[in-house]
Image (tube, grey):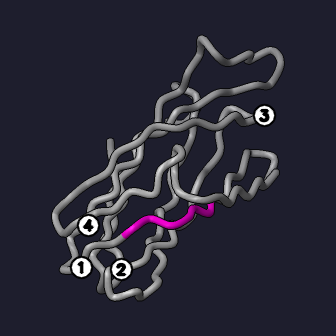
Amino acid sequence: MPRMKEIDQHGVVVQTQVNYLPEQSDEAGNRFVFSYTITITNLGPLTAKLISRHWIITDANNHVQEVRGQGVVGEQPLLKPGQSFEYTSGTVLATQVGTMRGSYQMQAEDDTLFEAEIPQFVLSVPRVLH
């Protein structure tokens, strides 16, 4: 089920949906592959551009990966008020369960820079968490 959180006065909302990919995973080799679909919606009054991303990925062994980069999936989407941008990406964990959270650095059309929080979400092999 998608999770949603309202973000500050700029009105950018981030929704997440996760899928476990058993066909790409190797459970015996401690390789668990997940895809995640992100929907970014601009509910604010100003057009905003996604500049960069920052992810914090933590597995069940408390191994933390930080990922920073320009844009998402090779794009820096421009979101007018009321527009959404959706993309799917993936990550690999060494454990059956982990979490992801982070933020997008956004730039509003008035040149204000702001962070759009990505609320923490769980990556879990089905039937591991109840």
Q: CA distance from mark 1 to mark 4?
A: 8 Å
Instruction: Point out which mark residue 108 bears.
Output: 2
Residue at 56 percent across and 64 percent down: it is 52
> Residue 119 at x, y = what percent?
47, 63
Residue at 68 percent across and 32 percent down: it is 96
Q: Earlier in the sequence, mark 3 or mark 2?
A: 3
Instruction: Point out which mark residue 94 bears.
Output: 3
Q: Which residue is denoted by mark 1 in the rendering?
A: 46
Label 4: how many Cα within 10 Å (few below 14, some 14–19, many 20+)? many
User: Decide: marks 1, 3 in contact (CB < 8 A)?
Assistant: no
Label 3: how many Cα within 10 Å (few below 14, some 14–19, many 20+)? some
Instruction: Point out which mark residue 42 bears.
Output: 4
Residue at 53 percent across and 26 percent down: it is 20
Q: CA distance from mark 1 to mark 3?
A: 41 Å
Amino acid type, residue under disc 3 in the picture: Ala
Q: Is residue 70 magenta?
A: no
> Residue 43 at x, y = what percent?
20, 70
* Region rendered in magenta: 49-54
> Residue 21 at x, y = what percent?
56, 21
Amino acid type, residue under disc 2 in the picture: Ala
Which type of secondary structure does the marked residue at label 4 adopt? Answer: strand
Q: Choose mark 4 or mark 2, whichever is in front.
A: 2
Q: Is residue 68 left or right of residue 124?
A: right
